[in-house]
Amino acid sequence: MRSSNILILFCLASSSLLACSSRGTPPPSCIPGVDCPTDAGVDATDASRDAAFDAAGEAGMVRDAATDAPADTGPLDAGPLTGDTYVFVTDVLDMAAPDPAGDPTVTFGFDLDDRVSDAMDRLGCRKVDRTSPPPDLFEGVDNELGPLLVSSEASFNFIGNLHAVVRSGELLMLLRLRGVDDLVNDDRVELDVIFGQLPPGAGAPTRTLADRFEAGQTFDVQAESLDATGGALVVLPGQIVDGRFRGAAGDFTLSVPFMGRAVPLQMSGVRLRFNVVATAYDTGVLGAALDVETTVTALVGGGVDPGVARFVLEGAADLLPDDRRRCQSVSVALIMAGVPAVLGDTVAATP
């Protein structure tokens, strides 16, 4: 699916990062000879420190899900959805990272593991969690890939490439919000994530003087985004609280093109929030985890050198530690906004 290029961009950038670090130096999350994981297992110093740290964590580091862990969905009515449907096309899409002129510990994202980690926490692969700015104000934000890619923009221009495919209409992410009785507070709605493409004859989306998409444009729907009944393959159940959509889903796979091949990338623990009114959605944040092994396998199938893929993903991994405290997944966050759109014909994705 040509329009799902969003996730493959980090692979291109990551390949370039390794090319500049071909000596194979360890990831900066550990110090060689001091605290890097070895095949011999966890050393005694680390083990005793981890035991004390984890004990302290039970009192404050691990967040209590019943109190301060942010809920993305509440009790949902089991009855049929009622209300209006709103369709938006995403015309702002970016990697979430700290403001270079602001606090480096603040960035958009989610606490995907319900844990606030610091540089001593091996359960978080010693990656320092961040906090998110308003309106969410989360602690323990997990977002390792975003800052990594943004910090390399001057050399590799992957953010510029991301902006280019959105502007050109090569990447059209359509959000269909269904069952809306109230755009301020609604305890049950559903969000369909659909990929679209330009209708025949359209060279690019029409833009306004403010450099946003003109509202109300029609975009065709890629059949690969739908199931056999015509419903969306990706559906996030959620609710609207104080004008902000909160949604979460389990795992879903996006098939993306890379080097002439379809590469399935599995996103886990997806969470999405955005402010919504009838005429726009904005301040959107999407967070998810990418499993290292699954993603390496997918990228190797797409033609990426396995050493490149593993070096970058293992170096950034910060979620789901195994029994040796090696994290098996890496977090990512995107920021998004969009304007109203109309769904057109259902068509096969353009190669």
Image: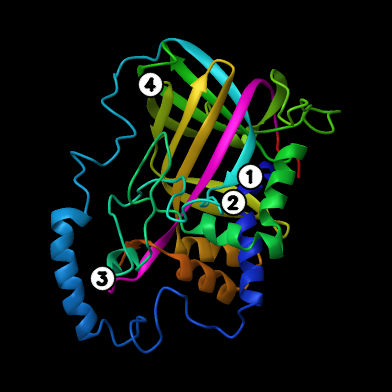
Task: Report the amino acid beneath label 1.
Answer: Ser
Q: Earlier in the sequence, mark 3 or mark 4?
A: 4
The image shows residue 314, relative to residue 172, as above or below, that is below
- Spot occupied by residue 108 in the image (x, y as percentages of width and height): 46, 45
Among the 4 quarters of the image, the one containing residue 91 = top right
- Spot occupied by residue 110 in the image (x, y as percentages of width and height): 39, 45
- Kindly report the distance in space between the C-alpha atoms of the residues bearing marks 1 and 2: 7 Å
Looking at the image, which residue is at 68% across and 56% down?
158
Q: Secondary structure at mark 3?
A: loop
- Kindly report the distance in space between the C-alpha atoms of the residues bearing marks 1 and 3: 34 Å
Q: Earlier in the sequence, mark 1 or mark 3?
A: 1
Task: Report the amino acid beneath label 3.
Answer: Asp
Q: Secondary structure at mark 1?
A: helix
Q: Earlier in the sequence, mark 2 or mark 4?
A: 2
Q: Label 3: which residue?
A: 323
Q: Label 1: which residue?
A: 4
Q: Earlier in the sequence, mark 1 or mark 4?
A: 1
Q: Is residue 247 visible?
A: yes
- Kindly report the distance in space between the C-alpha atoms of the residues bearing marks 2 and 3: 29 Å
Magenta segment: 323-347
